[in-house]
Image: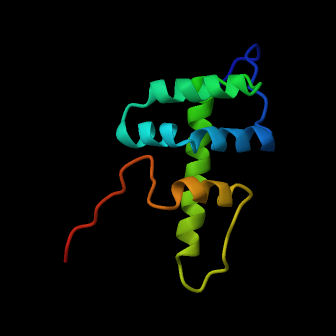
Amino acid sequence: MQSQNQKRAPAWTEQEVLDLITVQGEESVLSELRSKRQNAKTFKKISEAMRDRGYSRDTTQCRVKFKELRQAYQKTKESNGCSGTEPQTYCFYAELHAILGGGCHHYPTPVRGLR
């Protein structure tokens, strides 16, 4: 439980999220995230790039926010893969699909056993 003296970071604005996705989608950043399991230095670079854009988000905030975005994207994509369901989307789906959709996952995909 947070103490009353601690303040929560302000909510992310839509433009701030779009800028995070843009920074995250840069080929050099994607390449680093794909090649490393421990990517704290990469998220430090991302938070510095966000600072250069006028935002004050630390490494952890950037990592957590992108993890939330990636999970929402994957959940939506999986939902759309089920037959008989209405297509689902959310406000950043197209932007995330551009960087995550083509098999460009940040983390290894589980491999299913052969029959």
On the rendered structure, is 70 left or right of 33?
A: right
Residue 107 position within the rendered picture, expressed as x and y whole percent measured from the top left:
40, 47
**Colour convention:** rainbow
Quadrant in the picture for residue 111: bottom left
Question: What residue is shown at x 58% (from left), y 74% (from top)?
Answer: 80
Against 38, residue 72 (above or below) is below
Question: What residue is shown at x 53% (from left), y 29% (from top)?
Answer: 43
Residue 97 position within the rendered picture, expressed as x and y whole percent measured from the top left:
59, 59
Against 49, residue 6 (above or below) is above
Quadrant in the picture for residue 17: top right
Residue 87 position within the rendered picture, expressed as x and y whole percent measured from the top left:
66, 76
* In-front residue for pair 78/6: 78
* In-front residue for pair 97/75: 97
Q: For the view shown, which residue lies furthest in the top direction?
A: 5
* In-front residue for pair 51/82: 51
Quadrant in the picture for the N terminus = top right
On the rendered structure, is 61 left or right of 54?
A: left
Quadrant in the picture for the C terminus = bottom left
Question: What residue is shown at x 66% (from left), y 38% (from top)?
Answer: 20
Q: For the view shown, which residue lies furthest in the left direction?
A: 115
Residue 79 position within the rendered picture, expressed as x and y whole percent measured from the top left:
57, 71
Quadrant in the picture for residue 2: top right
